[in-house]
Amino acid sequence: MSGTDHRRGVLPEDHPQGPAIILVEPQLGMNIGTSARAMLNCGLTDLRIVNPRDGWPSEKAMQACSGALLVIENAQLFDTVEDAIADLNYVIATTARDRDMIKTVFKPEAAAAEIHKRNPGGQQNCGIMFGPERSGLDNNAISLCNAMLHVPLNPGFSSLNLAQAVLLVSHAWYAQLVEDVPPVELVSGETVPAKSRDVEHLMRHLEDELEASGFFASKEMQPTTMRNIRNMFGRMDITEQEVRTFHGIISTLSGRKTWKSSRD
Amino acid sequence: MSGTDHRRGVLPEDHPQGPAIILVEPQLGMNIGTSARAMLNCGLTDLRIVNPRDGWPSEKAMQACSGALLVIENAQLFDTVEDAIADLNYVIATTARDRDMIKTVFKPEAAAAEIHKRNPGGQQNCGIMFGPERSGLDNNAISLCNAMLHVPLNPGFSSLNLAQAVLLVSHAWYAQLVEDVPPVELVSGETVPAKSRDVEHLMRHLEDELEASGFFASKEMQPTTMRNIRNMFGRMDITEQEVRTFHGIISTLSGRKTWKSSRD
Protein backbone atom coordinates (compact mmCIF):
# COMPACT_ATOMS: atom_id res chain seq x y z
CA MET A 1 0.00 0.00 0.00
CA SER A 2 1.35 3.39 -0.91
CA GLY A 3 0.13 6.84 -0.02
CA THR A 4 2.79 8.67 1.99
CA ASP A 5 2.10 12.38 1.82
CA HIS A 6 5.55 13.73 1.03
CA ARG A 7 4.46 17.31 1.50
CA ARG A 8 4.18 16.82 5.21
CA GLY A 9 6.95 16.24 7.70
CA VAL A 10 7.53 12.71 8.87
CA LEU A 11 5.66 13.47 12.05
CA PRO A 12 3.20 16.27 12.84
CA GLU A 13 4.55 18.87 15.24
CA ASP A 14 2.09 18.05 17.98
CA HIS A 15 2.72 14.31 17.72
CA PRO A 16 2.90 12.84 21.21
CA GLN A 17 5.82 10.77 22.44
CA GLY A 18 4.86 7.14 22.01
CA PRO A 19 6.35 4.18 23.82
CA ALA A 20 9.98 3.21 23.27
CA ILE A 21 10.47 -0.04 21.37
CA ILE A 22 13.21 -2.13 22.96
CA LEU A 23 14.68 -4.94 20.86
CA VAL A 24 16.66 -7.32 23.04
CA GLU A 25 19.46 -9.19 21.25
CA PRO A 26 17.89 -9.04 17.79
CA GLN A 27 19.62 -11.47 15.46
CA LEU A 28 19.13 -9.95 12.01
CA GLY A 29 19.89 -6.39 10.98
CA MET A 30 17.14 -6.72 8.39
CA ASN A 31 14.59 -7.30 11.13
CA ILE A 32 15.77 -4.20 12.97
CA GLY A 33 15.25 -2.22 9.76
CA THR A 34 11.79 -3.57 9.07
CA SER A 35 10.87 -3.00 12.71
CA ALA A 36 11.98 0.63 12.37
CA ARG A 37 9.76 0.98 9.32
CA ALA A 38 6.79 -0.49 11.20
CA MET A 39 7.44 1.89 14.09
CA LEU A 40 7.47 4.99 11.91
CA ASN A 41 4.35 3.76 10.10
CA CYS A 42 2.72 4.06 13.49
CA GLY A 43 4.38 7.31 14.57
CA LEU A 44 6.92 5.74 16.94
CA THR A 45 10.55 6.88 16.89
CA ASP A 46 12.28 5.78 20.11
CA LEU A 47 14.14 2.59 19.17
CA ARG A 48 16.48 0.97 21.71
CA ILE A 49 18.61 -2.02 20.82
CA VAL A 50 20.25 -4.28 23.38
CA ASN A 51 23.31 -6.19 22.25
CA PRO A 52 22.37 -6.94 18.62
CA ARG A 53 24.02 -10.15 17.39
CA ASP A 54 25.48 -8.64 14.23
CA GLY A 55 26.58 -5.30 15.67
CA TRP A 56 25.46 -1.72 15.25
CA PRO A 57 25.20 0.36 13.10
CA SER A 58 23.94 -2.12 10.55
CA GLU A 59 24.00 -1.68 6.80
CA LYS A 60 21.24 -4.28 6.47
CA ALA A 61 19.03 -2.40 8.87
CA MET A 62 19.53 0.78 6.85
CA GLN A 63 18.57 -1.02 3.65
CA ALA A 64 15.51 -2.71 5.12
CA CYS A 65 14.02 0.32 6.83
CA SER A 66 12.55 1.72 3.58
CA GLY A 67 13.43 5.27 4.48
CA ALA A 68 12.66 5.23 8.19
CA LEU A 69 16.05 6.83 8.79
CA LEU A 70 14.66 9.04 11.52
CA VAL A 71 14.29 5.90 13.60
CA ILE A 72 17.46 4.07 12.58
CA GLU A 73 19.78 7.05 12.98
CA ASN A 74 18.43 7.94 16.40
CA ALA A 75 18.38 4.37 17.69
CA GLN A 76 20.19 3.90 20.99
CA LEU A 77 22.46 0.95 21.67
CA PHE A 78 22.74 -0.65 25.11
CA ASP A 79 24.71 -3.49 26.66
CA THR A 80 22.02 -4.60 29.08
CA VAL A 81 18.27 -4.64 29.35
CA GLU A 82 18.55 -2.77 32.65
CA ASP A 83 20.36 0.13 30.97
CA ALA A 84 17.93 0.22 28.06
CA ILE A 85 14.92 0.76 30.29
CA ALA A 86 16.59 2.77 33.07
CA ASP A 87 14.68 5.99 32.33
CA LEU A 88 11.32 4.34 31.65
CA ASN A 89 8.48 4.33 34.15
CA TYR A 90 6.49 1.46 32.74
CA VAL A 91 7.65 -1.37 30.50
CA ILE A 92 5.64 -4.16 28.91
CA ALA A 93 7.32 -7.42 27.84
CA THR A 94 5.99 -9.17 24.74
CA THR A 95 5.87 -12.95 24.92
CA ALA A 96 4.40 -15.70 22.81
CA ARG A 97 4.39 -18.32 25.52
CA ASP A 98 2.71 -18.58 28.86
CA ARG A 99 5.20 -17.73 31.57
CA ASP A 100 5.07 -18.82 35.11
CA MET A 101 4.92 -15.26 36.38
CA ILE A 102 2.32 -13.31 38.21
CA LYS A 103 1.97 -10.27 36.00
CA THR A 104 -0.81 -8.67 34.05
CA VAL A 105 -0.99 -10.10 30.53
CA PHE A 106 -2.35 -7.59 28.03
CA LYS A 107 -3.59 -8.04 24.52
CA PRO A 108 -2.20 -5.37 22.18
CA GLU A 109 -5.24 -3.10 22.47
CA ALA A 110 -5.26 -3.24 26.25
CA ALA A 111 -1.52 -2.61 26.38
CA ALA A 112 -1.97 0.39 24.11
CA ALA A 113 -4.77 1.73 26.30
CA GLU A 114 -2.60 1.34 29.37
CA ILE A 115 0.22 3.29 27.72
CA HIS A 116 -2.12 6.06 26.58
CA LYS A 117 -3.52 6.27 30.08
CA ARG A 118 -0.06 6.59 31.62
CA ASN A 119 1.42 9.06 29.16
CA PRO A 120 -0.90 12.03 28.68
CA GLY A 121 1.42 14.93 27.94
CA GLY A 122 4.52 12.79 28.36
CA GLN A 123 3.96 12.07 32.04
CA GLN A 124 5.30 8.54 32.14
CA ASN A 125 7.91 7.14 29.81
CA CYS A 126 6.68 3.79 28.60
CA GLY A 127 8.31 1.01 26.61
CA ILE A 128 7.49 -2.26 24.91
CA MET A 129 10.16 -4.95 24.88
CA PHE A 130 10.71 -7.67 22.27
CA GLY A 131 13.05 -10.63 22.53
CA PRO A 132 15.38 -12.33 20.04
CA GLU A 133 13.69 -13.75 16.96
CA ARG A 134 14.34 -17.38 17.81
CA SER A 135 13.74 -17.59 21.52
CA GLY A 136 11.81 -14.54 22.68
CA LEU A 137 12.54 -12.76 25.95
CA ASP A 138 14.07 -14.75 28.78
CA ASN A 139 12.51 -14.74 32.21
CA ASN A 140 15.08 -12.36 33.64
CA ALA A 141 14.26 -9.70 31.08
CA ILE A 142 10.55 -10.21 31.64
CA SER A 143 10.98 -9.88 35.38
CA LEU A 144 12.37 -6.37 34.84
CA CYS A 145 9.10 -5.33 33.19
CA ASN A 146 5.83 -4.27 34.75
CA ALA A 147 3.47 -6.33 32.64
CA MET A 148 3.36 -8.75 29.74
CA LEU A 149 1.78 -8.58 26.33
CA HIS A 150 0.56 -11.55 24.35
CA VAL A 151 -0.61 -11.22 20.77
CA PRO A 152 -3.43 -13.69 20.14
CA LEU A 153 -2.50 -15.80 17.12
CA ASN A 154 -3.43 -19.13 15.58
CA PRO A 155 -1.95 -21.56 18.13
CA GLY A 156 -1.13 -23.99 15.34
CA PHE A 157 1.03 -21.41 13.54
CA SER A 158 1.97 -18.61 15.88
CA SER A 159 5.55 -17.85 14.90
CA LEU A 160 5.54 -14.17 14.03
CA ASN A 161 8.36 -12.28 12.36
CA LEU A 162 9.88 -9.67 14.69
CA ALA A 163 8.81 -6.70 12.57
CA GLN A 164 5.30 -8.14 12.30
CA ALA A 165 5.10 -8.31 16.09
CA VAL A 166 6.40 -4.74 16.37
CA LEU A 167 3.83 -3.62 13.82
CA LEU A 168 0.81 -5.21 15.51
CA VAL A 169 1.72 -3.76 18.87
CA SER A 170 2.73 -0.32 17.52
CA HIS A 171 -0.40 -0.09 15.44
CA ALA A 172 -2.62 -0.78 18.41
CA TRP A 173 -1.07 2.32 19.99
CA TYR A 174 -1.45 4.43 16.85
CA ALA A 175 -5.03 3.37 16.19
CA GLN A 176 -6.05 4.58 19.63
CA LEU A 177 -4.11 7.81 19.16
CA VAL A 178 -6.05 8.77 16.06
CA GLU A 179 -9.37 7.63 17.42
CA ASP A 180 -11.45 9.84 19.57
CA VAL A 181 -9.57 8.74 22.62
CA PRO A 182 -11.81 8.57 25.67
CA PRO A 183 -10.86 10.95 28.45
CA VAL A 184 -7.89 9.66 30.34
CA GLU A 185 -7.18 9.84 33.99
CA LEU A 186 -4.54 12.45 34.60
CA VAL A 187 -2.20 11.38 37.31
CA SER A 188 0.09 13.88 38.93
CA GLY A 189 3.37 14.24 40.77
CA GLU A 190 3.79 11.72 43.52
CA THR A 191 1.64 9.02 41.99
CA VAL A 192 3.88 8.60 38.94
CA PRO A 193 5.61 5.21 39.05
CA ALA A 194 9.32 5.34 39.71
CA LYS A 195 11.74 4.96 36.85
CA SER A 196 13.03 1.50 36.19
CA ARG A 197 16.57 2.32 37.30
CA ASP A 198 15.30 3.38 40.71
CA VAL A 199 13.26 0.22 41.13
CA GLU A 200 16.24 -1.88 40.07
CA HIS A 201 18.45 -0.03 42.54
CA LEU A 202 15.96 -0.89 45.22
CA MET A 203 15.96 -4.54 44.16
CA ARG A 204 19.74 -4.66 44.44
CA HIS A 205 19.60 -3.12 47.86
CA LEU A 206 17.07 -5.71 48.88
CA GLU A 207 19.02 -8.60 47.36
CA ASP A 208 22.27 -7.55 49.02
CA GLU A 209 20.65 -7.40 52.38
CA LEU A 210 18.76 -10.62 51.91
CA GLU A 211 21.94 -12.34 50.85
CA ALA A 212 23.88 -10.92 53.74
CA SER A 213 21.24 -12.15 56.12
CA GLY A 214 21.15 -15.69 54.72
CA PHE A 215 17.71 -15.36 53.24
CA PHE A 216 18.38 -17.56 50.21
CA ALA A 217 18.23 -21.27 50.93
CA SER A 218 20.65 -21.97 48.11
CA LYS A 219 22.71 -19.95 45.65
CA GLU A 220 20.94 -21.77 42.81
CA MET A 221 17.51 -20.64 43.86
CA GLN A 222 18.52 -17.01 44.41
CA PRO A 223 17.82 -15.80 40.84
CA THR A 224 14.39 -17.42 40.79
CA THR A 225 13.49 -15.98 44.13
CA MET A 226 14.63 -12.51 43.10
CA ARG A 227 12.72 -12.78 39.87
CA ASN A 228 9.54 -13.49 41.79
CA ILE A 229 10.23 -10.52 44.01
CA ARG A 230 10.86 -8.26 41.02
CA ASN A 231 7.56 -9.39 39.55
CA MET A 232 5.76 -8.39 42.71
CA PHE A 233 7.32 -4.94 42.67
CA GLY A 234 6.63 -4.63 38.98
CA ARG A 235 2.92 -5.19 39.55
CA MET A 236 2.92 -2.70 42.37
CA ASP A 237 3.62 0.36 40.19
CA ILE A 238 5.81 1.67 42.94
CA THR A 239 6.22 5.46 43.08
CA GLU A 240 9.44 7.40 43.70
CA GLN A 241 8.36 8.24 47.21
CA GLU A 242 7.60 4.59 47.86
CA VAL A 243 11.03 3.58 46.57
CA ARG A 244 12.62 5.92 49.08
CA THR A 245 10.40 4.50 51.78
CA PHE A 246 11.41 0.96 50.88
CA HIS A 247 15.08 1.78 50.96
CA GLY A 248 14.46 3.08 54.43
CA ILE A 249 12.66 -0.10 55.44
CA ILE A 250 15.49 -2.29 54.18
CA SER A 251 18.12 -0.14 55.85
CA THR A 252 16.21 -0.16 59.08
CA LEU A 253 15.59 -3.89 59.07
CA SER A 254 19.14 -4.75 58.12
CA GLY A 255 20.59 -2.34 60.61
CA ARG A 256 22.91 -0.87 57.97
CA LYS A 257 22.06 2.73 57.36
CA THR A 258 24.40 3.16 54.43
CA TRP A 259 24.36 0.81 51.50
CA LYS A 260 26.48 0.73 48.40
CA SER A 261 25.47 -1.82 45.79
CA SER A 262 27.92 -4.68 45.46
CA ARG A 263 26.73 -5.11 41.86
CA ASP A 264 27.32 -1.62 40.42
CA MET B 1 8.33 -14.29 18.67
CA SER B 2 8.15 -18.03 18.76
CA GLY B 3 5.68 -20.35 20.40
CA THR B 4 3.94 -22.47 17.78
CA ASP B 5 2.41 -25.48 19.45
CA HIS B 6 3.56 -28.25 17.14
CA ARG B 7 1.43 -30.84 18.87
CA ARG B 8 -1.69 -29.30 17.46
CA GLY B 9 -2.84 -29.23 13.88
CA VAL B 10 -2.31 -26.06 11.92
CA LEU B 11 -5.94 -25.13 12.47
CA PRO B 12 -8.42 -26.41 15.03
CA GLU B 13 -11.18 -28.59 13.61
CA ASP B 14 -13.94 -26.14 14.42
CA HIS B 15 -12.06 -23.17 12.97
CA PRO B 16 -14.48 -21.02 10.99
CA GLN B 17 -13.92 -20.02 7.41
CA GLY B 18 -12.36 -16.58 7.45
CA PRO B 19 -12.35 -14.08 4.59
CA ALA B 20 -10.45 -14.79 1.40
CA ILE B 21 -7.37 -12.65 0.88
CA ILE B 22 -7.16 -11.48 -2.74
CA LEU B 23 -3.79 -10.15 -3.92
CA VAL B 24 -4.21 -8.26 -7.17
CA GLU B 25 -1.12 -8.22 -9.40
CA PRO B 26 1.40 -8.65 -6.60
CA GLN B 27 4.89 -7.83 -7.81
CA LEU B 28 7.16 -9.89 -5.58
CA GLY B 29 6.88 -13.61 -4.86
CA MET B 30 8.49 -12.93 -1.49
CA ASN B 31 5.60 -10.67 -0.54
CA ILE B 32 3.11 -13.37 -1.48
CA GLY B 33 4.98 -15.76 0.81
CA THR B 34 5.14 -13.39 3.76
CA SER B 35 1.47 -12.55 3.23
CA ALA B 36 0.65 -16.26 3.38
CA ARG B 37 2.54 -16.53 6.65
CA ALA B 38 0.64 -13.55 8.08
CA MET B 39 -2.65 -15.13 6.98
CA LEU B 40 -1.95 -18.44 8.69
CA ASN B 41 -0.76 -16.60 11.82
CA CYS B 42 -4.32 -15.32 11.94
CA GLY B 43 -6.07 -18.53 10.93
CA LEU B 44 -6.80 -17.52 7.32
CA THR B 45 -6.17 -19.97 4.47
CA ASP B 46 -8.07 -18.83 1.36
CA LEU B 47 -5.45 -17.02 -0.74
CA ARG B 48 -6.37 -15.83 -4.24
CA ILE B 49 -3.81 -14.30 -6.55
CA VAL B 50 -4.68 -12.26 -9.61
CA ASN B 51 -2.08 -12.10 -12.35
CA PRO B 52 1.13 -12.05 -10.28
CA ARG B 53 3.92 -10.22 -12.08
CA ASP B 54 6.52 -12.96 -11.68
CA GLY B 55 4.25 -15.94 -12.31
CA TRP B 56 2.88 -18.76 -10.20
CA PRO B 57 3.85 -21.05 -8.55
CA SER B 58 6.70 -19.07 -7.08
CA GLU B 59 9.83 -20.49 -5.50
CA LYS B 60 10.36 -17.20 -3.65
CA ALA B 61 6.88 -17.34 -2.18
CA MET B 62 7.55 -20.87 -0.94
CA GLN B 63 10.79 -19.79 0.70
CA ALA B 64 9.32 -16.69 2.32
CA CYS B 65 6.19 -18.30 3.76
CA SER B 66 8.06 -19.82 6.73
CA GLY B 67 6.12 -23.05 6.56
CA ALA B 68 2.67 -21.70 5.71
CA LEU B 69 2.48 -24.29 2.93
CA LEU B 70 -1.18 -24.95 3.63
CA VAL B 71 -1.86 -21.47 2.27
CA ILE B 72 0.66 -21.40 -0.58
CA GLU B 73 -0.20 -24.84 -1.95
CA ASN B 74 -3.92 -24.16 -1.94
CA ALA B 75 -3.66 -20.66 -3.36
CA GLN B 76 -5.84 -20.06 -6.40
CA LEU B 77 -4.62 -18.20 -9.46
CA PHE B 78 -6.92 -15.96 -11.53
CA ASP B 79 -6.59 -13.84 -14.64
CA THR B 80 -9.02 -11.16 -13.58
CA VAL B 81 -10.31 -9.56 -10.41
CA GLU B 82 -13.84 -10.43 -11.49
CA ASP B 83 -13.01 -14.13 -11.61
CA ALA B 84 -11.20 -14.04 -8.30
CA ILE B 85 -14.22 -12.73 -6.41
CA ALA B 86 -16.96 -14.39 -8.47
CA ASP B 87 -18.15 -16.66 -5.62
CA LEU B 88 -17.86 -14.07 -2.87
CA ASN B 89 -20.83 -12.26 -1.42
CA TYR B 90 -19.03 -9.33 0.13
CA VAL B 91 -15.63 -7.91 -0.74
CA ILE B 92 -13.70 -5.09 0.92
CA ALA B 93 -11.00 -3.19 -0.99
CA THR B 94 -7.99 -1.96 0.95
CA THR B 95 -6.69 1.45 -0.02
CA ALA B 96 -4.17 3.89 1.37
CA ARG B 97 -5.48 6.93 -0.45
CA ASP B 98 -8.77 8.72 -0.39
CA ARG B 99 -10.78 7.72 -3.43
CA ASP B 100 -13.48 9.67 -5.06
CA MET B 101 -16.02 6.93 -4.48
CA ILE B 102 -19.13 6.75 -2.44
CA LYS B 103 -18.52 3.64 -0.39
CA THR B 104 -18.24 2.81 3.25
CA VAL B 105 -14.66 3.17 4.45
CA PHE B 106 -13.84 0.85 7.32
CA LYS B 107 -10.95 0.78 9.71
CA PRO B 108 -9.57 -2.75 10.17
CA GLU B 109 -11.58 -3.46 13.32
CA ALA B 110 -14.85 -2.32 11.76
CA ALA B 111 -14.13 -4.32 8.61
CA ALA B 112 -13.48 -7.38 10.74
CA ALA B 113 -16.71 -6.85 12.66
CA GLU B 114 -18.63 -6.53 9.39
CA ILE B 115 -17.16 -9.82 8.14
CA HIS B 116 -17.91 -11.63 11.39
CA LYS B 117 -21.47 -10.31 11.23
CA ARG B 118 -21.95 -11.56 7.69
CA ASN B 119 -20.36 -14.96 8.03
CA PRO B 120 -21.77 -16.78 11.03
CA GLY B 121 -21.61 -20.45 10.12
CA GLY B 122 -20.26 -19.67 6.67
CA GLN B 123 -23.34 -17.83 5.46
CA GLN B 124 -21.66 -15.23 3.31
CA ASN B 125 -18.31 -15.68 1.60
CA CYS B 126 -16.28 -12.57 2.27
CA GLY B 127 -12.99 -11.31 0.91
CA ILE B 128 -10.44 -8.58 1.44
CA MET B 129 -8.59 -7.28 -1.61
CA PHE B 130 -5.07 -5.82 -1.75
CA GLY B 131 -3.47 -4.06 -4.71
CA PRO B 132 0.02 -4.17 -6.19
CA GLU B 133 2.83 -3.07 -3.86
CA ARG B 134 3.69 0.09 -5.75
CA SER B 135 0.36 1.50 -6.78
CA GLY B 136 -2.40 -0.10 -4.73
CA LEU B 137 -5.76 -1.08 -6.21
CA ASP B 138 -6.99 0.82 -9.22
CA ASN B 139 -10.43 2.36 -9.26
CA ASN B 140 -11.89 -0.37 -11.44
CA ALA B 141 -10.95 -3.08 -8.97
CA ILE B 142 -12.29 -1.00 -6.09
CA SER B 143 -15.57 -0.47 -7.90
CA LEU B 144 -16.09 -4.24 -7.95
CA CYS B 145 -15.99 -4.28 -4.14
CA ASN B 146 -18.69 -3.51 -1.65
CA ALA B 147 -16.72 -1.34 0.72
CA MET B 148 -13.27 0.05 1.34
CA LEU B 149 -10.80 -0.40 4.15
CA HIS B 150 -8.24 2.17 5.22
CA VAL B 151 -5.56 1.38 7.78
CA PRO B 152 -4.84 4.50 9.83
CA LEU B 153 -1.10 5.16 9.67
CA ASN B 154 1.30 8.05 10.22
CA PRO B 155 0.44 10.28 7.24
CA GLY B 156 4.08 11.33 7.00
CA PHE B 157 5.25 7.72 6.53
CA SER B 158 2.36 5.53 5.53
CA SER B 159 3.92 3.18 3.01
CA LEU B 160 3.24 -0.28 4.35
CA ASN B 161 4.74 -3.51 3.08
CA LEU B 162 2.10 -5.78 1.51
CA ALA B 163 2.47 -8.53 4.11
CA GLN B 164 2.28 -5.95 6.89
CA ALA B 165 -1.02 -4.70 5.48
CA VAL B 166 -2.30 -8.27 5.19
CA LEU B 167 -1.25 -8.93 8.78
CA LEU B 168 -2.95 -5.88 10.28
CA VAL B 169 -6.20 -6.62 8.52
CA SER B 170 -6.11 -10.38 9.12
CA HIS B 171 -5.26 -9.92 12.75
CA ALA B 172 -8.21 -7.62 13.30
CA TRP B 173 -10.38 -10.55 12.14
CA TYR B 174 -8.58 -13.08 14.32
CA ALA B 175 -8.61 -10.91 17.43
CA GLN B 176 -12.39 -10.65 17.24
CA LEU B 177 -12.70 -14.37 16.61
CA VAL B 178 -10.94 -15.28 19.82
CA GLU B 179 -12.64 -12.60 21.86
CA ASP B 180 -16.03 -13.13 23.31
CA VAL B 181 -17.68 -12.04 20.14
CA PRO B 182 -20.89 -10.16 20.78
CA PRO B 183 -24.02 -11.84 19.47
CA VAL B 184 -24.34 -11.37 15.76
CA GLU B 185 -27.39 -10.79 13.69
CA LEU B 186 -28.22 -13.97 11.86
CA VAL B 187 -29.43 -13.26 8.39
CA SER B 188 -31.20 -15.92 6.44
CA GLY B 189 -32.01 -17.10 2.94
CA GLU B 190 -33.27 -14.33 0.74
CA THR B 191 -31.46 -11.52 2.53
CA VAL B 192 -28.00 -12.86 1.72
CA PRO B 193 -26.27 -10.55 -0.75
CA ALA B 194 -25.83 -11.97 -4.21
CA LYS B 195 -22.50 -13.37 -5.20
CA SER B 196 -20.16 -11.05 -6.99
CA ARG B 197 -20.42 -12.92 -10.29
CA ASP B 198 -24.18 -12.40 -10.31
CA VAL B 199 -23.85 -8.71 -9.61
CA GLU B 200 -21.20 -8.37 -12.30
CA HIS B 201 -23.45 -10.22 -14.74
CA LEU B 202 -26.16 -7.73 -13.97
CA MET B 203 -23.77 -4.82 -14.51
CA ARG B 204 -22.85 -6.18 -17.92
CA HIS B 205 -26.46 -6.57 -18.84
CA LEU B 206 -27.05 -3.00 -17.80
CA GLU B 207 -23.99 -1.65 -19.61
CA ASP B 208 -24.88 -3.46 -22.84
CA GLU B 209 -28.33 -2.04 -22.81
CA LEU B 210 -27.19 1.41 -21.87
CA GLU B 211 -24.63 1.35 -24.64
CA ALA B 212 -27.13 0.09 -27.15
CA SER B 213 -29.49 2.85 -26.21
CA GLY B 214 -26.89 5.61 -26.52
CA PHE B 215 -26.75 6.34 -22.81
CA PHE B 216 -23.06 7.20 -22.70
CA ALA B 217 -22.26 10.70 -23.90
CA SER B 218 -18.80 9.56 -24.98
CA LYS B 219 -16.86 6.32 -25.17
CA GLU B 220 -14.22 7.86 -22.93
CA MET B 221 -16.60 8.56 -20.11
CA GLN B 222 -18.22 5.12 -20.23
CA PRO B 223 -15.82 3.39 -17.79
CA THR B 224 -16.15 6.18 -15.24
CA THR B 225 -19.90 6.17 -15.48
CA MET B 226 -20.05 2.39 -15.08
CA ARG B 227 -17.71 2.57 -12.13
CA ASN B 228 -20.03 4.97 -10.39
CA ILE B 229 -22.94 2.67 -11.11
CA ARG B 230 -21.05 -0.36 -9.78
CA ASN B 231 -20.30 1.58 -6.61
CA MET B 232 -23.97 2.27 -6.13
CA PHE B 233 -24.87 -1.39 -6.51
CA GLY B 234 -21.99 -2.39 -4.27
CA ARG B 235 -23.33 -0.24 -1.46
CA MET B 236 -26.78 -1.66 -1.98
CA ASP B 237 -25.90 -5.19 -0.84
CA ILE B 238 -28.19 -6.48 -3.53
CA THR B 239 -29.72 -9.92 -2.93
CA GLU B 240 -30.11 -12.74 -5.44
CA GLN B 241 -33.80 -12.09 -5.75
CA GLU B 242 -33.12 -8.42 -6.36
CA VAL B 243 -30.57 -9.28 -9.05
CA ARG B 244 -33.23 -11.29 -10.85
CA THR B 245 -35.65 -8.43 -10.47
CA PHE B 246 -33.14 -5.98 -11.92
CA HIS B 247 -32.47 -8.17 -14.92
CA GLY B 248 -36.19 -8.13 -15.47
CA ILE B 249 -36.28 -4.36 -15.21
CA ILE B 250 -33.49 -3.94 -17.73
CA SER B 251 -35.00 -6.42 -20.13
CA THR B 252 -38.34 -4.78 -19.85
CA LEU B 253 -37.03 -1.28 -20.33
CA SER B 254 -34.79 -2.22 -23.23
CA GLY B 255 -37.48 -4.22 -24.89
CA ARG B 256 -35.10 -7.19 -25.37
CA LYS B 257 -36.28 -10.17 -23.40
CA THR B 258 -33.19 -12.25 -24.07
CA TRP B 259 -29.76 -10.97 -23.40
CA LYS B 260 -26.38 -12.57 -23.92
CA SER B 261 -23.41 -10.62 -22.67
CA SER B 262 -21.25 -9.22 -25.41
CA ARG B 263 -18.34 -9.31 -22.98
CA ASP B 264 -18.29 -12.96 -21.92
Image (cartoon, coloured by chain):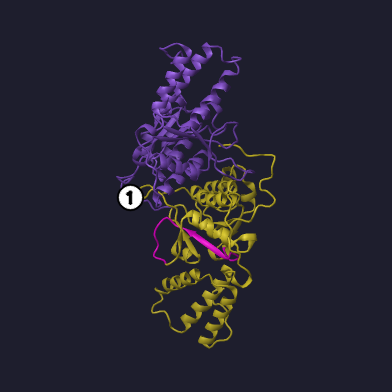
Chain colours: A purple, B yellow
Q: Which residue is mark 1?
A: A6
Instruction: Name the residue: 50% across, 81% down.
Output: B209
The quarter of the image holding the N terminus of chain B is top right
Q: Is residue B116 above or below residue B154?
A: below
Most extreme residue toward the bottom is: B255
Q: Nearer the viewer, residue B51 or A83?
A: A83
Q: Which residues are magenta?
A: B85-101
Circle 1 crowding by C-alpha within 10 Å: few under 14, some 14–19, many from 20: few
**Which corner quadrant of the image does residue B85 belong to?**
bottom right
Q: Is residue A217 above or below residue B123?
A: above
Residue A37, image x and y in percent? 42, 42
Residue A198 placement (x, y as % from top left): 41, 24
Q: At numbered mark 1, what does the secondary structure look like: helix, strand or loop? A: loop
**Circle 1 chain:** A
Membership of B163 in magenta stretch: no
Specify the amino acid type for callout 1.
Answer: His
Query: Does the rendering let one see residue A263?
Result: no
Q: How far across and down, in percent of the image, does residue B116 sit?
A: 57, 58
B93 drawn magenta: yes
Residue A76 appears in view: yes
From this view, report whether residue A52 is shown above or below residue B102. Answer: above
- In the visual, does B231 lie left or right of A221? left
Give the dominant element type of the magenta stretch: helix, strand or loop: loop
Of B27 and B199, the residue lying toward us = B199
